[in-house]
Image (cartoon, helix red, strand yellow):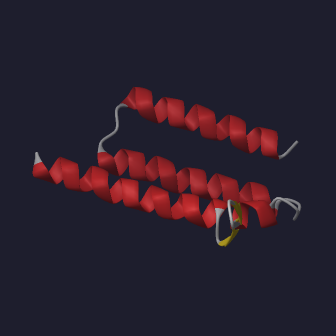
């Protein structure tokens, strides 16, 4: 039981690290700028970063023992996000 909680906690910490890196490397008051925002202006680089971050997050879900339904929802959300960011 404790091992499951530790895996979930580790996955949560890693996901939070990715979120902060993506959304708020530099902050000014309530606003922030992350790698995702900067790379969005570079053709293809933003999509590569998003897909890479999505792969890491999905891997964390697998490592934490998330259900197949949860992993499928994550993949769908991340896939739609990646596709729409390319448009």
Which residue reaches farthest bottom?
26
The extreme front residue here reads 29
In the image, residue 73 sits, relative to residue 82, either above or below, namely above
Q: Is residue 16 left or right of residue 45?
A: left
Left or right of residue 40, residue 2 in this image: left
Where residue 40 appears, x then y in whole percent? 82, 59
Q: In the rendered image of this protein, does residue 56 appear above or below residue 84?
A: below
Measuring 49% from the left and 64% from the top, which residue is drawn there? 17
Quadrant in which residue 84 is drawn = top right
Q: Position of residue 64 (x, y in %)?
A: 31, 48
Residue 27 position in % (x across, y down)? 68, 70
Q: Is residue 65 above or below residue 41?
A: above
- Quadrant, the C terminus: top right
Of residue 30 and residue 56, the one placed in the foreground of this image is 30
Residue at the location (41% across, 52% down)? 60
What residue sits 68% from the left and 54% below the top? 50
Q: Residue at x 10, y 45 (%)?
A: 1
Residue 42 location, x and y as percent? 87, 65
- Residue reaching furthest to the top: 69
Total numbered labels: 0
């Amino acid at each position: 039981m404790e091992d499951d909680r530790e895996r979930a906690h580790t996955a949560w910490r890693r996901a939070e690290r990715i979120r902060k890196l993506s959304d708020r490397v530099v902050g000014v008051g309530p606003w922030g700028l992350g790698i995702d925002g900067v790379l969005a202006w570079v053709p293809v680089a933003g999509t590569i970063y998003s897909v890479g971050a999505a792969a890491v997050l999905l891997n964390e879900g697998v490592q934490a023992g998330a259900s197949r339904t949860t992993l499928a929802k994550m993949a769908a959300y991340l896939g739609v996000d990646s596709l729409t960011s390319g448009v």
